Amino acid sequence: MLIATALLALFMWISVLPLYEALASRRGTQALSAENTPLRDFCSVENYFKSLPHDPRPPEPPKPAVRTLPAWLRPLAGAALRLPVDAAVREIRLEDDRQAAALAAHVERFRSLTYVSVSTRGISASGMATILKTLPKVTGLVQLHATCPVPKGIFRSASGVRCVWIDSSTRVVNLLGPDEMNDLAALRDLQHLNLRHIRINDADLQLLAQSDSLRLIILRAEGVTPEGIERLKSSMPECDVRLIPPP
């Protein structure tokens, strides 16, 4: 009797093991999804990078193998199967404190995460502190998008990033100053910088010339003069500097 019970228990465990593995592999995405966090297992700006003369990103990480769950177990998994496995997530967009906390709790599970967007207007000071502690743990981070006002220290917490986007997220033009420019110039691997709907003066823009790695700067900015652009180009002959007039 004991043997039969043990065999039955073993059979049940083996039978439901794929269900356990399927749910466990999505533990992080389930936590983020519960907080309505936008996430993707693909690059949403692929066409943008294809339009550039040089793609600054490293090769795409290989997609993890995902086992197909037997049909009779799928109803037990529910909506979780519609989520990507943690190891396949490429992009996460943070818009509030709860989303930041969910990422912090599961960041080690997102081994393929290369893009993080931080919408600062919905995140408190404590939530931003959580993000600054979490970003260094995103070991494959390549792309960072931040809206204004840019939180102090966010670039120092993403030291290996190659692409940075900064925008105002509203029609209100925000000022970028010398602190942000110095932090950007200090990023040793930064190759691509896109500044949209912001205000910056010529002197602060010139601080980017400290960078040895920048190869493309796109400016949709107010406050920059043609003379300032020409000085920056002269200081950075290996960098393509483009000024797009604000609409």
Image (cartoon, rainbow, N blue to C red):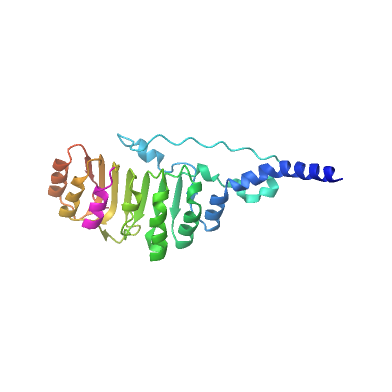
| Residue at the image point whose x is 61% and y is 49% from the top | 80
Judging depth in this view, the residue of 84 and 25 nearest the camera is: 25
Q: Position of residue 202 (x, y in %)?
A: 16, 53
Identify the residue at the far right of this view: 1
Judging depth in this view, the residue of 45 and 141 nearest the camera is: 141
Asked whether residue 124 appears in the rendered view, the answer is no
Q: Position of residue 49 (x, y in %)?
A: 36, 38
Would you identify the image quadrant in which residue 241 lies? top left
Q: Is residue 17 above or below residue 170?
A: above
**Residue 246 located left or right of residue 14:** left
- The magenta segment is 177-188
Judged by its main secondary structure, the magenta piece is helix
| Residue at the image point whose x is 48% and y is 43% from the top | 111
Judging depth in this view, the residue of 122 and 61 nearest the camera is: 61
Q: Position of residue 54 (x, y in %)?
A: 31, 34
**Residue 238 located left or right of residue 83:** left
Q: Position of residue 8 (x, y in %)?
A: 80, 43
Would you identify the image quadrant in which residue 9 lies? top right
